[in-house]
Image: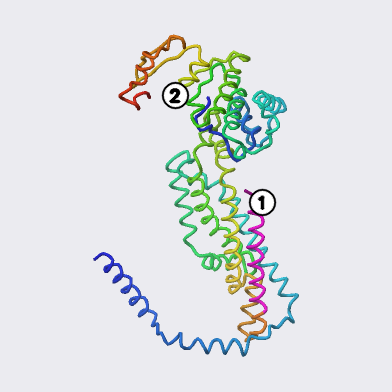
Amino acid sequence: MVFQHFQLLTRLSAWTNVMAGGFAGMPLWRPLLGAFSAEDRQRALAALREVGLEEYARRRVEELSGGQKQRVAIARVLMQRPKLLLGDEPISSLDAVTAERVMGFIAGLHRRHGVTVMLNLHDVAAARAYASRIIGLSAGRVVFNGAPKQLTDAALRRIYPPDDEDGAH
Amino acid sequence: MRRIAAAAAVVALLVWSGAGIGFSAGAFGDLGNTFAFVAEHWFPADLADWKTALRAMADTLQIAVFSTLAALAIAFPLSFLAARNWAPYRWLYDATRFGFNLIRSIPELVLALVFIPTLGLGPMPAVMALIIHNIGVFGKLLSETIEAADDGPQEAVKAMGGTRLLVALYGIIPQMLPLALSHYFYRLEVAIRTTLILGIVGAGGLGQMLYNDFKQFMYQKVTFEVLLIMVLVTAVDYAGALIRKRVK
């Protein structure tokens, strides 16, 4: 799961944050004593390397930029060996360039690890660029369900009715 | 109208309390006598017993440090049970909170007096009194710090499948550390002053030395002891500031 506001342990290191992704699969005493196994440490470091943040492993998350934080969150997801990645507006609190990079990393997750990715986005351009399937919701109803190239202007107007700017939630 | 009523209430409280203690404004006029008394009898400071005084100062510091550290160690885990956002059961939250309030309501001086017949004179009754009272104080301060902790990291640990213990360890404790340190050093400072007061009931240290010298009208020695107290409290405050600066 990737969140709009990252949901990281801001006062702890990026490395620890990624290892927290493995909490569910560890015996309780390991995280309780901070005695993570060598394998978990290596996997966490490899995950950070994959999002290009290996050299920030020992940095506190609160010292990182917004895009770097979301990349730590993606590395944390990698640690969970997910089959399905859910993202709740993962790029809404990022600027356009950073958002593009983060989308790139998420797409990489799908390409390299075969993870199914399901995001909810308000950025139509990003959805068109990365998705293989787009589902449009308006006022709680599915009003579009198809490939990006089927998402015509008419279809878009059904998702975002022009007279109701806040209808698309 | 309400403002007038509020002002009238404050004046009424002042009159009621002031009349009760027989306050007379003349006491301020007599302050000059106090200055003259101090100027005449308290200077220069008598440093003859400096070795004993320094030893007593160390005793005072040790009583305060040991008691507050022990109280912190006991109160820290308990304070999670007294935090609404962490406590696993409502009754446990209520019980822990009630316990903290109960032991905090008893002043250290009273606790020390209770312990003297069984523990004898010396530092032990003071240490026990300080520990018990400060468990109540730390319990309250820390549980409120836990309740004020940001939700984000706690949600993150839960989302990763972390148990309640891990939520505390990774989601809350890192956030509360700076504030907890702040609370600790403030309570240490208070404990030093309390230890001085408890010297009057035989707890030892600088407080007892000061009280004994005072009873024998050796004001110049008292002056030196008061100076040492100021040095001690200032030094602890300074050390606290230094350590807090390094833990951000």
**Residue farthest along the left direction in this orientation:** B1
Q: How crowded is the residue under tag 2: few (<14 C-alpha within 10 Å), some, or many (20+)?
A: few
Which residue occupies the foreground of this view, B52 or A68?
Answer: A68
- Give the residue drawn at x 57%, y 60%: B187
Q: Quadrant of residue B234?
A: bottom right
- Chain hosting mark 2: A
Which residue occupies the foreground of this view, B74 or B8?
Answer: B8
- The span picked out in magenta is B224-248
Q: Could you tell me which quadrant the N terminus of chain B lies in?
A: bottom left
Say whether mark 2 and mark 1 are on the same chain: no
For residue B78, which numbered disc appears in the image? Answer: none
Vertical arrangement, residue B235 with respect to residue B157, above or below: below
**On the image, numbered disc 1 is attached to which residue?**
B246
Which residue occupies the foreground of this view, B129 or A108?
Answer: A108
Q: Position of residue B16 (x, y in %)?
A: 33, 76
Vertical arrangement, residue A3 with respect to residue A126, above or below: below
Q: Position of residue B162 (x, y in %)?
A: 56, 31
Q: Quadrant of residue A47?
A: top right
Q: How is the image coloured?
A: rainbow
Q: Position of residue A37 (x, y in %)?
A: 70, 28
- Chain hosting mark 1: B
> What type of secondary structure mainly makes up the magenta span?
helix
Please, what is the three-letter code of the amino acid marked with disc 1? Arg
Q: Position of residue A84 (x, y in %)?
A: 53, 17
Q: How crowded is the residue under tag 1: few (<14 C-alpha within 10 Å), some, or many (20+)?
A: few
Is A14 placed left or right of B32 in the picture?
Answer: right
For residue A122, which numbered disc appears in the image? Answer: 2
Is B230 placed left or right of B21 in the picture?
Answer: right
CA distance separating discs 1 and 2? 42 Å
B215 magenta-colored: no
Please, what is the three-letter code of the amino acid marked with disc 2? His
Is B166 placed left or right of A136 in the picture?
Answer: right
